[in-house]
Image (cartoon, rainbow, N blue to C red):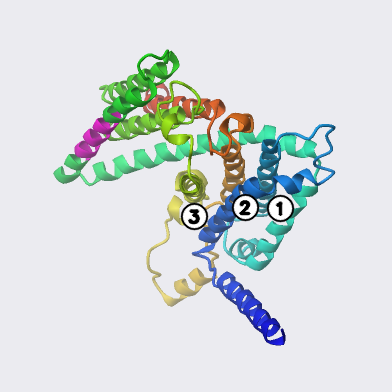
Amino acid sequence: MWAASCLASCCAACACEACRTAVGSIGRRSARIAYCGLFALSLLASWVLREVAAPLLQSIPWINHFHKTPDREWFETDAVLRVSLGNFLFFTILAAIMAGIKDQKDPRDKVHHGGWMAKIFCWVVIVFLMFFVPNGVVSFYESISKFGSGLFLLVQVVLLLDFVHGWNENWVAKDEQFWYMALLVVSVVCYIGSFAFSGLLFHWFTPSGQDCGLNMFFIVSTLILVFVFAIVALHPKVNGSLLPASVIGLYCTYLCYSGLSSEPRDYECNGLHNHSKAMSTGSLTLGLCTTILSVVYSAVRAGSSATVLSAPDSPRAGSDKPLLPFSKADEEETKDVPKPVTYSYSFFHLIFSLASMYSAMLLTGWSTSVGESGKLVDVGWPSVWVRIATQWATAGLFIWSLVAPLLFPDREF
């Protein structure tokens, strides 16, 4: 017994020391990766609690104070929302603390990049305290999460448009035949992918013998959008490029597939339902990992976006300083000048706040379809319409990005 106790103590001490070493090794360059890891941990905690915490929540009197105990799905949704609420508050508090940081000499810069043991402890405490808040607070958070999720999807669309236009401008600026050919090849591949993918959508989601007018409308309207993008981009007055039009067209086709595949499994027009009724744990794990990667990528890219977040005096916004100082005096003066931050810390954390809302909606079927989605992630009619609305918003913003310079020639876009 004594030997076993000593061994357990040694193992615990080694584990704590390993965690302390890992946390202590987080530096300025790896801080954003650490925030991504913390966010991924919150999603994993939400998923685990959704699967195992329902019996525990049923036994807590200030949560289960109903005359008739709700179904198990209600407690699963409640567990996800409470973890998401804690995550939202954590990142929102950080966003408020980091507001207005312009250079690295600001004391709050160290808070953003360091103090990880304290931040992890605070995150755990905040999430734990969320299981003591009244149900009314959680219900209110559930309502505003739908709007916050919409904002997050809008940010995703803006980032995609910024990326595609930047990609096109970068290759065109090289002004070489090879890069023009590369633009053409990528555009053709994207169009072939869009049309081939659309053919699969007709095969999967408009089975013969079923009245699938809604699915037919979604697929046909997507094909129309793909053609409209090309027509508008190639108009002589617009003077656009096929690359952005083809990439956005392929993305809209993917959004159509994502929406149709989120239809309830018992819907007769969902041709994938025969293969999805008995989803394995591995499939669910893959779906959750994909969601995590998508959300984390959007948050990190938004937190690093030069067009949206860079301060006017940041290096990304341009600088008139010479690359090398002219003298030692200039070098000493340069050392005394505080380095500006390269992105907005506050907005970086705000994106994670919105991502917390969005991930909660994914894990709960947008909190309205737990009964029909069962254990599946992001399944139900609300998920379908969110995907289709995102597609329409993407199409509208892309067309606006092409025609806005014509409508407002005096403004810079």
Region rendered in magenta:
183-194
Can the viewer see residue 179?
yes
Circle 3 SS class: loop
Say if mark 3 contacts mark 1, CB within 8 Å.
Answer: no
Looking at the image, residue 332 sits to the left or right of residue 63; the answer is left
Q: Quadrant of the C terminus?
A: top left
Kind of residue at badge 2: Ala
Mark 3 surroundings within 10 Å by alpha-carbon count, few (fewer than 14), some (14 through 19), many (20 or more): some
Q: Name the residue under label 3.
A: 314
Q: Name the residue under label 1.
A: 127
Asked if 187 appears above or below 218 in the picture, the reply is below
Q: Position of residue 226 (x, y in %)?
A: 32, 24
Instruction: State the image quarter where residue 324 is shown.
Output: bottom left
Circle 2 SS class: helix
Circle 1 SS class: helix
Viewer-closest of 49 and 273: 273
Q: Residue at x 43, y 55 (%)?
A: 319
Say if mark 1 contacts mark 2, CB within 8 Å.
Answer: yes
How far apart, in angstroms, are the residues tagged by discs 1 and 2?
10 Å
Please identify the dominant SS of the magenta region: helix
Asked if 255 appears above or below 3 in the picture, the reply is above
